[in-house]
């Protein structure tokens, strides 16, 4: 049953067995708690038993849904890209907890979720992705975690909405870089700088580990910021929006 389900997911988007040649971004929105509880038994069949037990320990349904959808989508993207059956063992983790797909040489993944969205990045090189639901800029956070030049740029903005857009753009870009190098928040966010270039792009400065890494932001939906960092400059043009409804219709 597991392999049959795996073979039909995403079949309209690409050819199974085609290797990953660029950084691809996929996003899926959460459903209601009631809908998720009805669908959860199906999706639990697509992850290892140990993963399912971890999912069941979540106290809140929304947290369980974010975690489960992220892993299910990542596993199906790996299957879709290589033609291999879905792995039956949990993802191994790097030193700082970054998921590593065993048995898929030359393919890197990263998962992020916030609010009503789960995002998965697939790349031929190390990759980090971060999505954040925007809110009012937290007092003191930028001063504590951003570099001097980043704070100077942020403090030059008077409009609160524009300031929030800049803050969460910088935050997601920084998080994506830390996730790409596998260090998460164990590395200080103010130890490197995100610079906005005249061409409208973003680059990393003042960090020896940033050599070769590229940054890109993507539009998702209003109220969210999405950024990706990878050691490859071949990015997909847009985010692929995956719907649970579409997946279930194919299964049925």
Image (tube, helix red, strand yellow):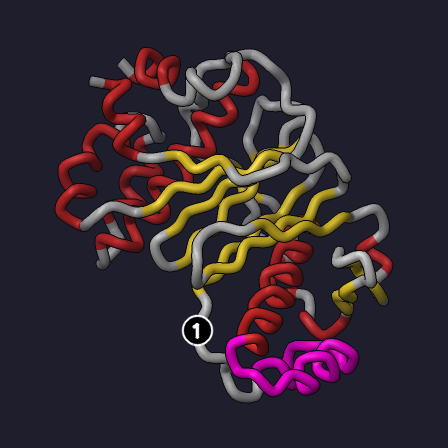
Q: Residue at x 36, y 46 (%)?
A: 67
Residue lying at 47% horizontally and 60% vertically, measured from the top left: 224
Q: Is residue 227 magenta?
A: no
Is 156 part of what is drawn in magenta?
yes
Give 244 or 141, whichever is nearer the viewer: 244
Residue drawn 68% across the image and 66% down it: 187
Local secondary structure at mark 1: loop
Spot occupied by residue 184 in the image (x, y as percentages of width and height): 61, 59
Which region shows up in magenta?
141-161
Residue 126, relative to residue 32: is it above or below?
Answer: above
Residue 47 drawn at (x, y percent): 35, 30
Task: Give the main secondary structure of the magenta stretch.
Answer: helix
Circle 1 is placed at which residue position?
135
- Location of the C terminus by quadrant is top left
Q: Quadrant of residue 116?
A: bottom left
Q: Crowdedness of circle 1 by 10 Å Cα count: few (<14), some, many (20+)?
A: few
Asked whether, in this view, residue 92 is left or right of residue 177, the answer is: left
What residue do we see at 56% from left, 83% from top?
159
- Can residue 188 be seen? yes
Q: Is residue 95 visible?
A: no
Relative image position of residue 14 (x, y in whole percent): 51, 18
């Amino acid at each position: 049953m597991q392999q049959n389900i795996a073979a039909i997911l995403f079949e309209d988007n690409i050819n199974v067995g085609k290797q990953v040649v660029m950084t691809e971004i996929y996003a899926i929105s959460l459903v209601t708690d009631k809908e998720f509880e009805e669908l959860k038994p199906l999706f639990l069949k697509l992850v290892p038993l140990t993963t399912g037990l971890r999912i069941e320990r979540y106290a809140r349904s929304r947290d369980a849904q974010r975690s489960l959808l992220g892993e299910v989508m990542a596993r199906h993207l790996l299957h879709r890209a290589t033609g291999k059956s879905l792995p039956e063992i949990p993802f191994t983790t790097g030193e700082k907890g970054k998921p590593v797909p065993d048995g898929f040489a030359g393919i890197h993944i990263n998962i992020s979720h916030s609010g009503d969205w789960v995002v998965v990045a697939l790349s031929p090189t190390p990759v980090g992705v971060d999505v954040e639901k925007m809110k009012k800029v937290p007092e003191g956070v930028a001063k504590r975690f951003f570099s001097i030049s980043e704070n100077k740029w942020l403090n030059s903005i008077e409009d609160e909405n524009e300031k929030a857009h800049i803050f969460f753009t910088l935050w997601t870009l920084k998080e994506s870089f830390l996730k790409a190098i596998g260090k998460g928040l164990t590395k200080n966010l103010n130890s490197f700088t995100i610079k906005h270039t005249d061409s409208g792009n973003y680059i990393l400065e003042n960090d020896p580990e940033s050599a070769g890494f590229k940054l890109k932001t993507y539009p998702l939906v209003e109220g969210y910021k999405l950024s990706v960092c990878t050691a490859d400059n071949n990015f997909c043009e847009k985010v692929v929006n995956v719907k649970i409804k579409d997946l279930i219709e194919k299964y049925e």
